[in-house]
Every structure is written in structure tokens, then in C-alpha cells.
Image (spheres, grey):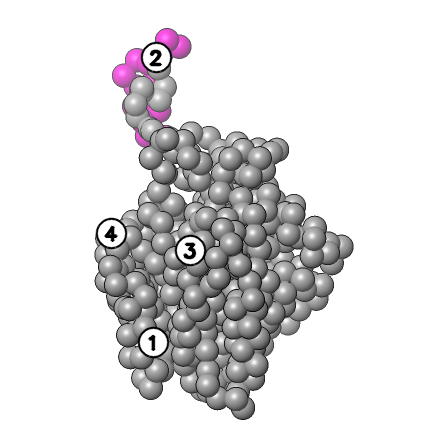
Amino acid sequence: MRDLAWRLIAEGANASTRYPPEGWLEYPPMTRTLTTTPAADGFRMPAEYEPHAGCWMLWPERRDNWRRAAAPAQRAFVQVAAAIARFEPVTIGVSAAYFESARRALPEAVRVVELSHDDSWMRDVGPSFVVHPRGRVRGVHWRFNAWGGLKGGLYAPWDQDELVALKVLEIEGRDRYRAPLINEGGAVHVDGAGTALVTEECLLNANRNPTLGRAQIEAHLRAYLGVSTIIWLGKGVFNDETDGHIDELACFVRPGVVCLAWTDNRRDPQYAISADAWERLHDARDARGRRFQVHKLPIPGPLAMTAREARGVELRADSAPRRAGQRLAGSYVNFYLANGGIVMPLLDPRRDRSAAALLKRLFPRRRLVGVRTREILLGGGNIHCITQQVPAAPPAA
């Protein structure tokens, strides 16, 4: 831009010269922050199996969360991005310090933008998009405190993560709803037809919204997700450091059909958690009064962090330590649905094949791609946690 300005001056530009030249840059519409709610405006959060316009991710960089200066995790993120890019456009936000190396590592089909952040969990820090029957798309910007703030949070500060949703919406050119609720995208699943799945362990945790009760939280979820029915499960996957996000435990396959992380081992702490979720789902009804059909998806492992893996993570006073022997919250439920595809984590050779077979049966019209993601699991999540879909605008009614 500076060179262009000097060239215009040298060529005799004057006060009447249009600068920049018309059409030189094209921007999407500016983002407005709205004072209403999605539900009041006729918006709803669509299900993840509805059509996408694209997918957002963030680049892993924290040395106190990702071992060996995040290099193994970055390779895993490249594989995930490449897999999703086979089905839909992918954009990755990268800090200035890592921009060039990330651009070299990622496929040309993946868009890379400079975007500062504290860590790489786009599902939780990015916007939750909502759609309107007249073909409009907007975003919900939740408040974020790194999964607990100063009462059990995973790192500090988190101020850059708190800005990610706004930045994504600015780039996408979508209006923003600023929710009054501390929440993360991985804490909610919706069926797109009026029903949401959540866990008590997460949303009722005192380290999120200590002044709000269940009824008040439900009111906010209805207002900002555009749902009418909220199904409360109990705890999330055992030892999930996000305080039990639903996206490790259960998800919708389609309205009325749920996939649930499961183990038959009654000695495993996960058994009681999954059994309780099964019972709650059996007793519940969705927004249209239907009983749920529940499919049990076996969990991997149990898996644990090795001493070698733990040694590769730098210790810092303001972040949660990684310890040898720490059980990892592995789950095949943490997959990503892309346009015509499903990208699933490969975590355990003893369980990968059976999990893939069930997912193929549940999503017969989607091409299944598996990615080895232990390095992502070591950082505290998996494929669903590091991605955020942008829904396609519905055809105008």
C-alpha cells in the first residue's frame, strides 16, 4: 500500500485522485455487534451434519501444552487440515511468529491468516454460528475463561483467546451476538431441530457461571442457540480437563439419534459415567417428543501419557502441568463432520477398526478418513476440539 501511495504521487495524483483506486480491495461487510438474541431474531444453531461453507482451525504453539515445542502436534494438525480440505475450505489462524513455517507446512488448499491466540482450541474460543431461514449467517461470541479461570483453568492469561471469535467474525463478515454466558463450543451439541445436549459437570460448574442456576443457564442456551429442549447428561468423559465437555461424550447423528462413548468394563470409571448418560437419554425426549436411539461407540484404551511424552512439555507456573501416567480423555466421538466426509481420530489399534465400522454404518453417505491424533490428545482434546465449522447459508425461503 505504501509503494502504491508513492507511485500515485509520482504520477501526479492530486486531491481529486481516488485512493485507493476503485476495486483495489474488496472487503466483506463489517461485523456489527447486536443487542438482541439469535432466538429473538429467528436464528438457530444448525447441526454439524448440515452443509458447511468451511472450517476454521488455530495453529498449536504453546510449549507448556504441546511437547517438543509443539512440532509433533503441528504435524498432526497439518494432517487434520489436509483431511478436512478434501471436503471443504479450511482456514487456519497462526501467530506472526509462526506464520511462515505454518504456511510452508500446510497444503496450498488451506488458507492461512495471521491471528494471535493463546492456544489452538478453535471449537471453544471461536464463534458458534447460527443461521436464519432467509439465508443469513451470524455468530455467537461466548465469554471464555480458559475452562475455569483462576479456579481450575488450564492457563493464564487467556485474553487473546477471548478475542478469537470476534476476529473470525470480522474476517467472515458476519454479525455478532455477544453472549453473557461463559461457555465453550465443545460444551454444546445441537440437532438443528430444537434440541441441545450438555453436561452438568461443565455447565453447572462453579468455575464457569457461579451466580447462575440451571434455569438461568437454560434460558441463555435457548436464547443463543435457538433451541427449545435441553437434555442434561451428568459427567463427561473421565478425566476430561475441560470439566466434561459433551463433545467427548455424545453427539447427534441426526435428530433423534445419538452416538455415546461407551465401555463394557465395569471397573473403568468411564462405565458409570456412560451408563448414567445412557439412562438419561433413554428417559429423555427431544424437542419433537421423540425417544432417542442411542448407539454405543467404544472408547479407546484406556490411554495414558508416557514419561517421555510428559518430559517434552515445558513447565510453567501459569499453566496446568502434564504428568506421566495421566489418563488421557480419549474418545472416538470427537470427530469432525465435513461436507460428504467424516474425519475421525485414530487412537488405539485395538479399537480403531471397530469404531470406524460403526461410524461408517451411522454415516453411510460420508467418506470416512482416519487421522492419527495422539499428539492432539496429549494436549487435551482431539479433532472436534480443534475445529469449528462455518455453516452454509440456507437457501432463502
**Is residue 122 placed above or below 328 in the rendered structure?**
above
**Is residue 189 placed above or below 23 in the rendered structure?**
below
Tell me the crowding category of disc 4: few under 14, some 14 to 19, or many 20 or more residues within 10 angstroms, Cα based.
Answer: some
Q: Earlier in the sequence, mark 1 or mark 3?
A: 3
Type of the residue with mark 2: Thr
Is label 3 in contact with label 4 (beta carbons under 8 Å)? Answer: no
Please report the residue visible at 35 percent of the width from the left and 22 percent of the height from the top.
Answer: 20
Disc on res. 17: 2
The quarter of the picture where residue 39 lies is top right
Of 321 and 261, nearer the camera is: 261
Any magenta on residue 387?
Answer: no
* Closer to the eye: label 1 or 2: 1
- Quadrant of the image for the N terminus? top left
| Residue 23 in view in this figure | yes
Of 42 and 137, nearer the camera is: 42
The answer to whether 233 appears left or right of 168 in the picture is right
* Closer to the eye: label 1 or 4: 1
Residue tagged 1: 355
Type of the residue with mark 3: Pro
* Closer to the eye: label 4 or 2: 4
Please report the residue visible at 52 percent of the width from the left and 51 percent of the height from the top.
Answer: 287
Residue tagged 3: 255
Badge 4 marks a residue whose secondary structure is loop
Which contiguous range is marked in magenta? 1-17
Residue with the most extreme top position: 16
Q: Tell me the distance, in whole angstroms, between the alpha carbons under discs 3 and 4.
A: 33 Å
Q: Earlier in the sequence, mark 3 or mark 2?
A: 2
Q: Earlier in the sequence, mark 3 or mark 4?
A: 4
Please report the residue visible at 44 percent of the width from the left and 40 percent of the height from the top.
Answer: 131
